[in-house]
Image (cartoon, helix red, strand yellow):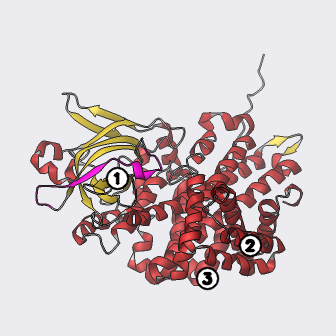
Amino acid sequence: MDQAPRYVQHVPPPADPYDGDELLQSWLHARLGADGHAAARPRLAALAAEVTGPLRAAHADAEAHPPTLLRYGPWGDRVDRIDTPPGWEVLRRAAARHALVALPYLPEAQTTWGAGARVVQHALLHLYGPESATFSCPVAMSDGAAALLSRPEVDPAVREAWLPRLLSTDPDTAVTSGQWMTEAQGGSDLSRSSTVAVPAADGTGGWRLTGEKWFCSAADSAIAVALARPRGAAEGTSRVLAPFLVPRYAADSPLAETNAARSADPRLPAPGVRLHRLKDKLGTRALPTAEIGLRQAYAWPLGDPAEPGLGRMMTLVVVTRLHNAAAAAAGMRRGLAYAQAYAAARQVAGGRLADHPLHRATLGTLAVDAAGAFVLAGHAFALLGRVEVDGDPEAAAELRVVAPLAKLATGRLAVQAASEYVECFGGAGYIEDTGIPRLLRDAQVLPIWEGTTNVLALDVLRAVRRDGAGRPLLARLSAAGQRSAALREVTAELSAAFGADLTSDNGVAGARGLALRAAYALAAALLLEQAAGGDPAAETLARLWTRRWLRHEDIATDV
C-alpha cells in the first residue's frame, strides 16, 4: 500500500539584508546624505550579495566544524596549532576584502564620508556579523588594536610594522588581533592581574611577559593586545597596567631567529606562548578561544610602560564595546528576518502563521526592539567617527556614556529577542541542525564580553560623575523630548538621578536600573530624531518603543 508523502516544511530565505532593511536604508540616508549613501551603496550591496550566498555557506561550514587544538607534533615537539575549517578562512578573507576593519582608517573613505566613514563601517558590520560564525569578534578586536596603534605615543616602528597589516584589504597580507586581558583570579577586576612585564635584555627595545591569560578570543590571530603589570609598578591597582602587542606565531617573533626550524612553519607559536586548551563554550563555538600561558613571551609596549596604561587600553575597549552593540543589533535584525520568512511559509489553523494576529503582534514587538537596538549601536559609531575625524569634544563627552549604555542595553535586548526567535520556530527552533538554537547560544555572550551589565552600569556612573557625560546625554534627550511627553518625564527623572549622590550605597545599588532607563530613553530620542528627518516608519517605531520601554505598556494591539 502506498504511503502518504512525508511532509517537509520548506523555509524561504530571508530578504536581502541590505535592500530589505528599511531602517538601515533610512538611517544611512539621514546620516550620510543622498550622495554619501549613493557612494556607499555599491560596497554595501556587494557584501549583502556575498552574505546571502558564499558567506552563508561558509558560516554553516565553520559552525559545523569547530576549531581543534593540536598540542604536539608526531615526534613530540610542542606545536600548539589551532586548526580551523575552510569556512573560517572564507569569512576571514571576506572581512579583509570588504574592509570591515580598514574602512574608517582609509584616506579615501574619510575623503568621501568624513566622520561618516564609521557610519558606513557600522552598516557593513550589520550585514556581515549575524552569519559570520562570530568572525565579527576578531574583526572587533582588530579594529580596537588598530585604534590603539594609531595613538601618537605608540612607537612608530611598532605601528609601521603592524598597523598596515591590520588595515590591509588584501586577504593574503591582512592579519587579525586577539585580546588577552582577563585572568582567572580577577576576571573583570583587572587590579588583580598578575601577568608581569620586564624589559628584554637583548637590546631590541622589546619586553618579556610572564603570566596566565584565561579568556583569549580569536586565539588563531597573528597578534594579541595583552595587559601586563610592568616590573616595579604598584600592586593591587589596575590603572598602572600597560598594553603590549604580543606576536602569536614564531615567524613574527624576534626570538624565532634563535630557532630557524620553528620559524619555518608559520603556524607554530612564538617562543614563550603556550596554549593550554580551547574553551568549551555555550556559544560562539566556531571562534577559537583559549587559555594561554606566557613564559618570557616577547612583546612590544604600546606607549610608555612607565606611564599608567589602562587609559590607553580603553581606546581599544571603547571600539570593541561598539562592535559588541553592533553584533547584538545585527543579530536581532537577522533573527527577525528568519522568523518573518518562516511565518510567511508556515501554515497554522488554516492560514499563514504571519496572518495570525497574536504571532503578528509578537513579530511586530520584536521589530520595535530591533529598531531600538540598531539606533543605539548606530549612534555610538557615528559619535566615534566625529571624535576620530573631527576631534569633536562634545561627541567625545557623549561617547563616554553612550558606549557603555549602547553595549549593555543591546546585549540584554539581544538575549531576550533570541529566546523569542527560538520560540517562533516551535520545536524546530530547538533542533541543532536548523541553526536556530545558535541564535540564543551566541546571543548570551553579548551581555558578558567587554563587561557585564553591572560592570557597565558602574562605568556609566563614573562617566556621569567624573567626566560630566550626563550633560550632553541630557541635552540630546531634552531636545528630542519636545516631541514626546513620556521622554520629557524620563529626562527629568534622569536629570535628578544624575545630580544625586551616585557613590552612596543606594546610588550604586540602583546603577543597573538607572543605566537601562537612560539607554531606553536614548533609543527613544534617536528614533524621534530619525522621524524628524522625514521617516514615517521611525515615527511609529519611536511611539511604540516609548510606550514599551518608557511607559512599560503592552503594545501588542498596536504593532
Q: Is residue 539 visible?
A: yes
Say which mark, if any, is on residue 34: 3
Instruction: Identify the residue under disc 2.
Output: 491
Of badges 2 and 1, the one in the foreground is 1
The residue carrying pointer 3 sits among few (fewer than 14), some (14 to 19) or many (20 or more) residues within 10 Å by Cα, namely few
Q: How far apart are marks 3 and 1 (CA)?
A: 54 Å
Residue 190: within the magenta?
yes
Local SS, label 3 = helix
- Image location (x, y in percent) of residue 102: 40, 68
CB contact under 8 Å: marks 3 and 2: no
Say which mark, if any, is on residue 110: none
Question: Reading the chain from its start, which is encountered first: label 2 or label 1?
Answer: 1
Q: Is residue 538 visible?
A: no
Q: Which of 333 and 198 is in front in this view?
A: 198
Q: In this view, does 28 lie to the left or right of 254?
A: right
Question: What span is in magenta?
Answer: 186-204
Amino acid carrying label 2: it is Thr
In the picture, the quarter occupied by the C terminus is: bottom right
Q: In this view, does 191 lie to the left or right of 392?
A: left
Instruction: Identify the residue under disc 1.
Output: 235
Q: Residue at x 83, y 74 (%)?
A: 485
Of badges 3 and 1, the one in the foreground is 1
- Image location (x, y in percent) of residue 558: 87, 61
Q: Which residue is drawn at 30% across and 73% down?
A: 153
